[in-house]
Image (spheres, grey):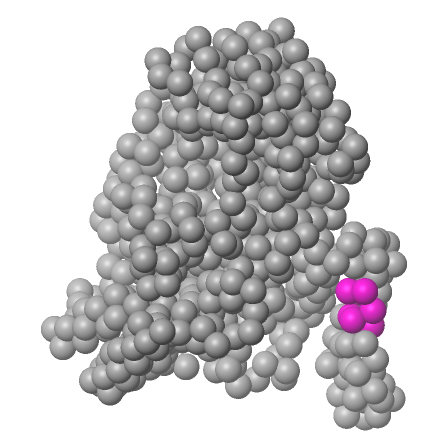
Amino acid sequence: MSGHSWLGISVGALMYLVCLTGSLAVFFEEFERWEQPHIEEYQQYSAELIDQAVGHALQRFKQLPESLYVVLPTDDVPRIHISDGDQEWFVNSDGSLSEPPVEGWTHMLKELHNHLHLPETVGLIIVASLGAMLCSLIISGLLAHPRIFKDAFKFRVGGKKHLEQVDIHNRLGVWGTPFFFIIGLTGAFFGLAGILITVNAEMSYNGDQEIMLNTVYGADPIVSNSAKTINYARALAELKQQAATATPIYLRIHKINTDNQFLEIAATLPQRLIYSEMYRFKASGEFINHQGLSDGDVGRQLAYSVYRIHFGHFNGFVSKILYAIMGIALTVLSASGINIWLNKRKQRSFLNDLWVAVVWGVPLALSLSAFFSLQGFSALLSFLWVMLAVSIGCWRIKNEIKSRGLLINMLLLSVLLLVASHIVIFGVELALSPAAFFINVALVSFSIMAGLIVHYKK
Amino acid sequence: MLIAIVCMLASVGGVFYAWKATTGEAFFAYKGKIIFTAWVGIFVSLVCWIQTLGAEYGVVYGIISLAFASWLFAAKNSELKVAQTKLKQHTQTWLAKKQLLHGAATLIVAGPIALLTSCLFSLALIKWLPFAVANKWFFAALLFPILWGLSCLWLCSADKLRGPSICLISLACLSCGILLGN
């Protein structure tokens, strides 16, 4: 039990931050649409549109890109965008290029979840280590639970704070175990796979990571004497013949405008968790092969399924809602673990105040940073300044009950302020358009419902 | 899908009411049988999810529905009391120097040393597995975080770090030897 406690206390605050941002990041596509609701949205596209968009994009690049990506519209994001991995633009329905995606609040949220805004490799390893710690906390939590069956449904609300937190922690933890374990393991995979690849390549492939990755994920085809122009229409028609149920999600043009160019169409398959299967075509549109991500070795299929399993991006919006609720449950689990430890202590100290600042300050900072980001300020700087102000404020107040009440009220007001500012900036029509409607309604509903709960509790 | 949801709710409900049954109640005599049947029901619900959504989505939805159904019954069982909000004495406590040093040492051993050991051991372990390369690699990728997490847990529970550190470093050397051996 002491190992579980110490490990939990050591990683508690970061775990809380990563879980909360992860729960919100489930909806990153919706947030991106909300941030730019004026971008043209459509589901139908043609090969001519893709051809025109590629032509316009190539005119804008100073150098010929190694690969060009055309991300196709889906039910979740009915927009086309084109990118070389560095520069990116949305595409209008007439094939012309629109504005680039903003690197605003959603970008900040994703980066915070993925690598805590630290240098990418270090941040990825730290976040991945939290996934590994989550797995060991789950195992040790189950082993250390002396009354796992006796207390299976016990839930004391109110009364002694310590008992309430213990019940919240144990009920959420025990019944959510399989799901939380999967999330921890897949989260760890993202960052630690890189280390494993580096070490394994060094030990078994003379340091050549490409050979190793090709062995695991499959290699690209070698194409020569390609046609000068890419026949998208034929490739899309061939795809329908090869895999009638596949839904294309993006195209990748390799070695564009060279003799070795070829086209890859990434497509999702029904009832499959793999991110996509990759179908390869010659520039003439003739089918070459598929990468075997859907029917290759089990390890390859699983490795390619990790993204959708972790983020819940499958089977439409229902999965996203369920994942967000489970994510919030994991966030509460992290917070209640630290609450148990703080309540067990004989006295209070600045740690109690700082913990309130983290638990209620992070959502407030996220909400206010979204507000400032809409006004054109840096989302990350706003987030950090708000967190600093909240931490100093809580430390000065030295009363966590008072601080918590204040922060909750500020959070609810800031969410309403955020929606109001969105309406003022983009106008009522865009704020209620399909691109922004869900987020605005969800934010207002959250604020009203949470306000009612707070009022009822008082 | 409806059958899967209803089956899950009924099964978890069965576990809940059997759990709640006290001596003297008629229900109590059949407690064991009811719990067993309910767990079979949970399995049947999982099969229904798989039938409806396919094996991959079905398993994910199955485990999420198990959590939701259980939390629902735990919420139903909640005992509401007036919250006690008495604040304890606020003091300027700080961790002792010894505790800080132990924490820093644990961080060093649990961080880079345990990380490297788990990585090397995972790779060494899969060397003899009779699977395809992709399968072996993915197995190592799953094993690695679990081993690292468990070694951190071991280090956090240990009073002294010397023993676990020596064990981890020895294991890292052994794994390295195996990997470089062929």
What residue do we see at 22% from left, 49% from top? Answer: A396
**Main secondary structure found in the magenta portion:** helix
Image location (x, y in percent) of residue A42 = 67, 17
Q: In which quarter of the image is residue A269?
A: top right
Query: A345 or A421: which is nearer to us?
Result: A421
Q: Image check: A169 left or right of B62? A: left
Residue B145 seen in the figure = yes
Q: Image check: A24 left or right of A234? A: left
Image location (x, y in percent) of residue A179 = 60, 62
Magenta segment range? B41-47
Question: As displayed, is residue A27 above or below residue B130?
Answer: above
What residue do we see at 61% from left, 34% from top? Answer: A280
Query: A329 or A18: which is nearer to us?
Result: A18
Q: Which residue lies furthest to the front in this view?
A: A225
What residue do we see at 68% from left, 32% from top? Answer: A287
Q: Image check: A394 left or right of B76? A: left
Query: A363 or A141: which is nearer to us?
Result: A141
Image location (x, y in percent) of residue A176 = 60, 65
> Magenta stretch containing residue A299, yes or no?
no
Image location (x, y in percent) of residue A72 = 62, 25
- Quarter of the image that includes the N terminus of chain A: bottom left
